[in-house]
Amino acid sequence: GAGVSQSPRYKVAKRGQDVALRCDPISGHVSLFWYQQALGQGPEFLTYFQNEAQLDKSGLPSDRFFAERPEGSVSTLKIQRTQQEDSAVYLCASSSTSGANTGELFFGEGSRLTVL
Amino acid sequence: ELKVEQNPLFLSMQEGKNYTIYCNYSTTSDRLYWYRQDPGKSLESLFVLLSNGAVKQEGRLMASLDTKARLSTLHITAAVHDLSATYFCAPSQKLVFGQGTRLTINP
């Protein structure tokens, strides 16, 4: 597609439910990032993929968070046993370059998760 | 650990005025990115500054980078209402973002 696509755009979950958020990056983009953005805050890094390899997951807040990108394109962020503090917008971004000095990021519209 | 500080965090200006947003960061980075975010929307790339002394301009916005001072500035000239948004800076290396500067431009 022309841009980064995320689904669902909105998700309401009951506390304790598992959720899965999908990201379809720009075709051919090597790098893929997940960020968590709380209301009124800047995006906070969660994890980074270079192709199918998850090179950095230092930002994942707990072992309830898990991300994968098995074929180096679409990525899924899974949150198990959701808690109220998980409520946020989850942003996916992709870049055509890789490595520590990554290039300009192209962001999706985000998935807004509300945990009741 | 890379820390990024923006100031001011909130800025209310009148149309036609000039102002500067500052972005300081704590560890070496040879490039810096500025993004814009409208309410309820995602982030849009504004500038990519790739070297010390880099200056880029787009319309009423101009960004500069001083890697030695670990400082970037975003200057707004003759502000117009359409520039109301939140602006984020992010040095490279996982693109750690600042807290954002929420800019409101009043008629």
Image: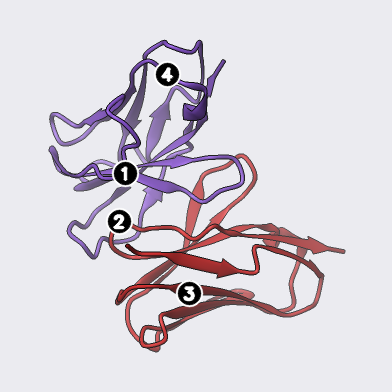
Chain colours: A purple, B red
Q: Is residue A49 left or right of residue B94?
A: left
At label 1, counting other C-alpha atoms closer than 10 Å, the crowd grade (few under 14, some 14-19, many 20 or more) is: some
Q: Residue at x 57, y 15 (%)?
A: A116
Residue B94 - label: 2
Give the CA distance from mark 3 to mark 2. Answer: 16 Å
Residues flagged by tags 2 and 1 on a common chain: no
Q: In the rendering, at what x and y percent does residue B77 appear? A: 69, 79
**Which numbered mark, 2 or 4, is in the foreground of this view?**
4
At label 3, counting other C-alpha atoms closer than 10 Å, the crowd grade (few under 14, some 14-19, many 20 or more) is: many
Name the residue beneath numbered marker 1: A59
Residue A82 - label: 4
Task: Give the amino acid type for the residue marked by disc 3 in the picture.
Answer: Asn
At label 2, counting other C-alpha atoms closer than 10 Å, the crowd grade (few under 14, some 14-19, many 20 or more) is: some
Image vertical order of residue B64 relative to residue A71, above or below: below
Residues flagged by tags 3 and 1 on a common chain: no
At label 4, counting other C-alpha atoms closer than 10 Å, the crowd grade (few under 14, some 14-19, many 20 or more) is: many
Q: Label 4 near label 1: C-beta < 8 Å?
A: no
